[in-house]
Amino acid sequence: MRRLLIMLAIVCLSGLALTISTTRAVPQQSPLSGHADIVNAQGQKIGTAMIHPSGSGVRIDVEVSQLSPGTHGIHVHTVGNCEGPAFASAGGHFNPTSKKHGKDNPEGAHAGDLLNIEVGADGTGKASLSNPNATLGEGPNSLFHEGGTALVIHEKADDYKTDPAGNSGARIACGVIQK
């Protein structure tokens, strides 16, 4: 009888443990990706960006058209707002760690600093850019922080060292980064 009661108690406790383990709150997962529709100063869609986790950071795949040929700076900015024509509403570069600008700056780089994008003679450009300083998850380096972020393309090349924006000139295109 005692043995039967012990076995019954074990079965009951096992069932209780199973119930508890299946009713625990499941932590929220990081978004698997993000995207941005890139618009020009007139508000016309001229491209897209797809953002995916990559190693400890993110990979940003950009395709654009209708831009002037040449090299253009491209950065993540700290506010998810793209009001043309100057896109000042996107704020400064995404910089949660208060660094200086540029991969070649000994005091840099901003979490929003990216390599330049090349635009061909036909006005189109395509790039896959790595950013080890940004994430899609929780925390200060998340591209999905409160207030959002934006991807901004500049009129000239980024020199990768001059604070605050690498002498990359005016903002000519912008896309709000979304889940």
Image (spheres, rainbow, N blue to C red):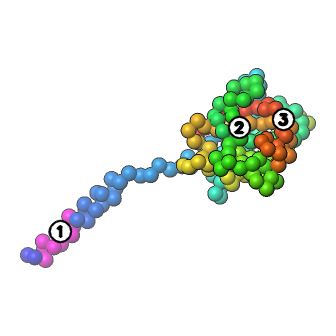
Q: From mark 1 to mark 3, how far is it between C-alphas?
A: 74 Å
- Earlier in the chain: of badge 3 and badge 2, it is 2
- Earlier in the chain: of badge 2 and badge 1, it is 1
Secondary structure type for disc 1: helix
Amino acid type at image mark 1: Ala
The residue that label 3 is drawn on is 169
Q: Quadrant of residue 11?
A: bottom left
Determine contact: label 3, label 2, CB under 8 Å: no
Q: In which quarter of the image is residue 64?
A: top right
Magenta stretch: helix, strand or loop mostly: helix
| Residue 110 falls inside the magenta stretch | no
Residue 76, how many percent across, how many down? 70, 41
Quadrant (top left, top right, bottom left, bottom right) of the C terminus:
top right
Residue 68, how many percent across, how many down? 87, 33
Camera-near label (2 vs 1) is: 2
Residue 11, above or below 108: below
Is 162 on the left-hand or right-hand side of 8?
right
Camera-near label (1 vs 3) is: 3
Which residue sits at x=60%, y=37%?
Answer: 148
Which residue sits at x=17%, y=68%?
Answer: 9
Note whether residue 120 is visible. Answer: no
